[in-house]
Amino acid sequence: MTSFGDATQQLINQFTNGEGDVASIANYATLHLVPQLLLAALGLGIIFIGYLVASYLSRVISKPVCRRVDETLGKFVGKIVFYCIMFAVVGAVLSKMGAPLGGLAAMLAAAGFAVGLAFQGTLSNFASGVLMLVFRPFKVGDVVNAAGVVGKVNEIDLFTTTLDTPDNRRIIVPNSSISGGTIENISHHPHRRVEVPVGVDYAASIDATRATLEAAVHQFDQEMVQGEGRGSAVVLSNLGASSVDWLVRMWVPSKDFFRLKEGLIREVKMQLDAADIGIPYPQMDVHLRRADATDEALFQRPRIRPIRSGTDPESLSQVS
């Protein structure tokens, strides 16, 4: 049986040579054109059915992952399932219709190589997005410090990650910038340690200062986290240039970190004021004295006069 392409070429040649007529057109339409149109319609119908099946399966597979593992990973898995099914259905339809898939595959490979060279940065973002979705250093809703940006994770896409900052700014960061640097997941653990540095006068008593700072931190006993390695501590940390340095620490729930840190700073200041323990300002003592005649002679630099033009160097050497 003559193929559709050969039949089309024969019809064109007949009309070019003046041999074509209505009967040849009717024969071509009956034997070749109508079957091909029906086959094309059938192929489109199969592709449409494949689209519906792919959408249904992607939802069915992604929902359990979203519910039990992670929403972002579930959406990613759903997209992968959808595109894999659609690629298989379209390839099968084209193969049945006689499309040269071997040549098409070679063309796609060459085009993919060229596109890969042109979009190296984009592909790097894609690879980084896949790695973050697989290893999950953070998830949607976490507060992170990544690529120099601190914010709450709103969405993790294949190419970018969307962060909302505390002052309500939305920042979109390329995934390669995040995976290539240090990632700090601030809200990963349920507990955080508040640490307030305090500097007091050297004249203040060590024991009195410790008791005052312990009284300040004990005001939060009901809100801090107790247990092994938790609780609170007052540490003498350093003898500074103008103050004795202390560290006041306590463990608190992560969600109350900033509120309790502000409260501890306020309580430390109030307790120090009540105990009449001062917090010194940074200072520097500069001592000045007037140099006598001997010192002035030591520090006086000799004068060097420039040589005038026209002066004989030999005469200068004789004078010296």
Image (cartoon, grey):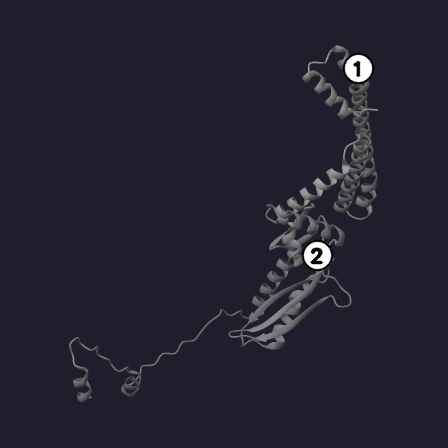
* Direction from residue 3 to residue 296 in the image, left or right: left
Residue 261 sits above or below residue 40 on the image = below
Image coordinates of residue 196 in percent, x first then y, are 62, 65
Q: Nearer the viewer, mark 1 or mark 2?
A: 1
In the image, which disc is placed on residue 254?
2
Choose top left, top right, bottom left or bottom right for residue 87.
top right
Q: Which residue is mark 1?
A: 27
Please name the amino acid that badge 2 sits on: Ser
- How would you rate the neighbour count of disc 1 (Cα within 10 Å): few for under 14, some for 14-19, many for 20 or more? few
Mark 1 residue type? Asn
| Other-residue count near label 2 (Cα within 10 Å), few / some / many at <14 / 14–19 / ≥20 | some
Quadrant where the N terminus is found in the figure = top right
Relative to 60, residue 294 above or below: below
Residue in the image at 76% along x and 39% along y: 102
Left or right of residue 119, residue 30 in this image: right
**Residue in view at x 72 percent, y 42 percent:** 106
Res 271 → quadrant: bottom right
User: In the displayed image of the protein, which residue is found farthest to the top?
Assistant: 22
Residue name at image x 81 percent, y 26 percent: 45
Give the mark nearer the N terminus: 1 vs 2. Answer: 1
Q: Is residue 255 above or below residue 104?
A: below
Residue 22 coordinates in the image, percent (x, y): 74, 10
- Name the element at disc 2: helix
Residue 64, by quadrant, is: top right
Q: CA distance from mark 1 to mark 2?
A: 80 Å
